[in-house]
Amino acid sequence: MEDGHIQQELNQVSVSKLPLVESKGKQDQKPNNTKKSRDARLSVILLDQGLFTVYKRLFVTCLALSITFLLISATGNFQYVTDKAALFSIGNILALTLCRSEACLRVVFYITVKVFGWSCVPLRVKTVVTSLLQSLGGIHSGCGVSSIAWLIYALGLTLRDKENTSTEIIGVTVGDSSAQTHDQHTHNGRTNQEQKTI
């Protein structure tokens, strides 16, 4: 008897009152006539996010410092940097690696908690430090771009002094700079796709 009553209630529910649920395949399909500028990575970075995020400030700071030293070196005003251009590229690669190293970040976070975890530390200071730690990717990206610039500069200096340089070093330098450029493009594309799915 009870089953018959439930069946009658189910028959009375109209299909139009039920919410429409599209299949996942249909949701993923987007019309091709959407504006490309809106979906472009630059558009996402500039319009959907703030112009002066901590990440972007760290990126610009790292890049500006590196480019400043690069320009001073290129003008011949800082001979040490000119002599050690490849070392500056390696230093940037080390910095970008440490910014993504789990072991290094664990040590940094541990020290940060021990230093700033006290209740006497103002909330504003804790917020600034937390924001900096969450935006270490800006240093990672800035050092990545800077390392490519330093590597190209070092390659130019090496090619100027071909007589004293082996062809293997030149080949490795050219291969490394093109691999870094490809890796950054691939990584950034993957990151952009992952952010869109979230």
Image (cartoon, helix red, strand yellow):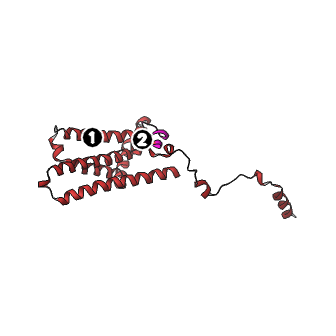
Callout 2, which amino acid? Ser
Name the disc covering residue 39, or none: none
Q: Which of the two discs, 2 and 1, labels the residue nearer the N terminus?
A: 1
- In three-dimensional space, the C-alpha distance between marks 2 and 1, rounded to whole angstroms, equals 25 Å
Residue to which mark 1 is pinned: 67
Q: Within 10 angstroms of label 1, few (less than 14), some, or many (20 or more) residues?
A: some
Percent position of residue 88, x then y:
23, 47
Residue that protrudes farthest toward the right in the picture: 1
Q: Which of 120/78 is in front?
A: 78
Residue to which mark 2 is pinned: 131
Q: What residue appears at the point 14 percent right and 53 percent down from the top-left corner?
A: 162
Residue that protrudes farthest toward the left in the picture: 163
Q: Within 10 angstroms of label 2, few (less than 14), some, or many (20 or more) residues?
A: some
Q: Which of 120/20 is in front?
A: 20
Percent position of residue 58, x then y:
36, 41
Q: Is residue 25 left or right of residue 171?
A: right
Percent position of residue 75, x then y:
18, 38
Is 44 contained in the magenta span? yes
Foreground mark, 2 or 1, reads 1
Please, what secondary structure does the residue beneath circle 1 have? Answer: helix
Residue range corresponding to the magenta coloring: 43-52
**Is 101 located above or below residue 36 in the figure?**
below
Res 55 quadrant in image: top left
Callout 1, which amino acid? Ile
Asked if the residue at tag 1 contacts the one at tag 2, i.e. Cβ–Cβ closer than 8 Å, the answer is no
